[in-house]
Image: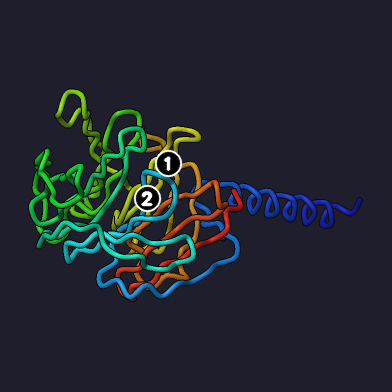
């Protein structure tokens, strides 16, 4: 083989190899499947999760309301408590039916009372050098813990033990600029975060190691995330438009 051609062949192989490595890198933003969009009319639609009976979704608004939503995107009504809290995230312990909410302005965690006619604060989550309007933005239940995201400055995930009633660990993540919500993935005990500034959903371990990243550029302001293996979709809520989105799982 001509020496120049041989060198060119090696260079092309190196380039192709580099491209393949980029494609499998956890920081390479993959694309989710078919997207469906639902207009809910929820103002400041900040978080979403599957409800305790797995018959629909909960949607949280930072106007202090918790909505019941069908899997077809239909808003079925609100949970009957009233509040003026700045709730930004919602999660459920399906084994007990307990609903947890994170409150940004107070840097606190609340539960919805058993009769669903009120809410009760269960914990303050102090954020060192935290900024009030970039505070607690997401919450996820898993393994007897609450995983709580501070949105920015700093981008921190706290682990709050429900048994000991205290923060047992915290980690600063570098893959996000705005931690807008969290979801605990029971299939492998990992976490998902959505970033409303980078328009990315990131799957990562509870130690902060990134597993995979997905584009969420079809949502104007993605602030809620929930992975739904039963229906084979990832749900996203949009704070800017009040829309709910489902994107087909292809991972």
Check disc 1 and report the residue beneath it.
204
> How dense is the environment of label 2, judged by Cα within 10 Å: few (below 14), some, or many (20 and up)?
many
Above or below, 216 relative to 135: below
Q: Which mark is residue 175?
A: none
Check disc 2 and report the residue beneath it.
193
Residue 143: percent from the left, percent from the top? 35, 29
Residue 206: tell me if it is visible: yes
Residue reaching furthest to the right: 1
Cα–Cα span, label 1 and label 2: 8 Å
Which residue is at a point 15% across and 28% down the rendered structure image? 165
Residue reaching furthest to the top: 164
Residue reaching furthest to the front: 115
227 lies left or right of 143: right
Residue 154: tell me if it is visible: no
Residue 70: percent from the left, percent from the top? 43, 61
Nearer to the camera, 8 or 209: 209
Residue 155: percent from the left, percent from the top? 24, 49
* Circle 1 SS class: strand
> How dense is the environment of label 1, judged by Cα within 10 Å: few (below 14), some, or many (20 and up)?
many
**Colour option used:** rainbow
Which residue is at a point 50% across and 35% down the rendered structure image? 187
- Disc 1 to disc 2: CB gap under 8 Å: yes
């Amino acid at each position: 083989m001509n020496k120049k051609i041989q060198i060119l062949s090696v260079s092309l192989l190196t380039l192709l190899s580099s491209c393949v490595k980029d494609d499998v890198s956890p920081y390479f933003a993959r694309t989710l499947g078919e997207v469906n969009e639902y207009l809910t009319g929820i103002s400041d639609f900040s978080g979403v999760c599957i409800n305790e009976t797995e018959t629909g979704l909960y949607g949280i608004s930072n106007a202090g309301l918790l909505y019941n939503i069908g899997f077809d995107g239909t808003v079925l009504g609100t949970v009957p408590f009233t509040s003026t809290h700045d709730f930004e995230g919602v999660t459920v312990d399906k084994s007990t039916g307990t609903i947890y909410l994170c409150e940004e302005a107070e840097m606190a965690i609340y539960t919805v009372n058993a009769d669903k006619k009120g809410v009760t604060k269960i914990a303050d989550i102090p954020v060192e050098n935290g900024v009030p309007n970039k505070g607690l933005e997401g919450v996820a239940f898993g393994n007897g813990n609450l995983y709580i995201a501070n949105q920015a400055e700093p981008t921190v995930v706290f682990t709050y033990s429900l048994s000991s009633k205290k923060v047992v660990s915290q980690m600063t993540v570098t893959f996000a600029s705005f931690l807008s919500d969290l979801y605990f993935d029971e299939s492998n005990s990992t976490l998902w975060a959505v970033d409303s500034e980078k328009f990315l959903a990131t799957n990562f371990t509870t130690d902060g190691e990134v597993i995979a990243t997905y584009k969420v550029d079809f949502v104007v302001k993605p602030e809620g995330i929930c992975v739904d293996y039963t229906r084979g979709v990832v749900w996203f809520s949009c704070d800017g438009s009040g829309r709910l989105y489902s994107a087909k799982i292809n991972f």
